[in-house]
Image (cartoon, helix red, strand yellow):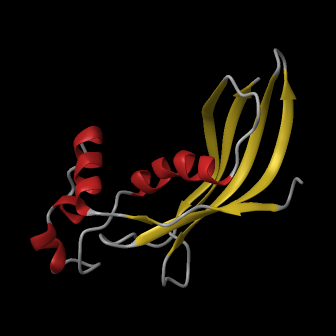
Amino acid sequence: MVGEHIGTSDWVVIEQERIDRFAEATGDHQWIHVDPERAKDGPFGSTIAHGYLTLSLIPALAWEVYTIEGVRLAINYGANKLRFITPVKVGSRVRAHLVLTGVEDLPDDAMQVATTVTVELEGAAKPAAVAETLSRIYL
């Protein structure tokens, strides 16, 4: 199973309200994210999602793809090889493709699961983001 594509999530629309809420939560109010009028004349022609907003969608999208029976707790442990490749414009749709890249047994009935996640941006030649995510699973 390691090395295999394990699934693809549903599409998620990135709306301005989500971007604005993320800006509030993080304090990142850069105009390319939160000022639609100014962003019209900017390099992307509209506002764009924060890269870390895209990253923050990965856990929910991943749980759409797979579940592990008997889990009492799952936590995000980290991300390796993270890249934000294509800006996600407001109104765009993204989805996640997951490849299982590693499973490591840990003490106390736990395991670490590594997945390479490619966040596809609908209609784009290149993905929005790619990351190897690490999760700690406690059974």
Q: Residue at x 48, y 51 (%)?
A: 57
Residue lying furthest left: 37
Residue 20 x/y as whole percent: 22, 52
Please give left or right for residue 50 compared with residue 128 in the image. Answer: left
- Above or below, comparing residue 127 to residue 123 in the picture: above
Dividing the picture into quadrants, the one containing residue 97 is bottom right
Residue lying furthest front: 69
Residue 81 x/y as whole percent: 65, 54
Residue 79 x/y as whole percent: 62, 45
Q: Nearer the viewer, residue 102 or 70?
A: 70
- Above or below, comparing residue 99 to residue 109 in the picture: below
- Above or below, comparing residue 126 to residue 26 in the picture: below
Image quadrant containing the N terminus:
bottom right
Q: Residue at x 23, y 65 (%)?
A: 32
Please give left or right for residue 137 compared with residue 50 in the image. Answer: right
Image quadrant containing the C terminus:
top right
Q: Nearer the viewer, residue 87 or 11?
A: 11
Q: Residue at x 49, y 82 (%)?
A: 124
Dividing the picture into quadrants, the one containing residue 17 is bottom left
Q: How many marks?
A: 0
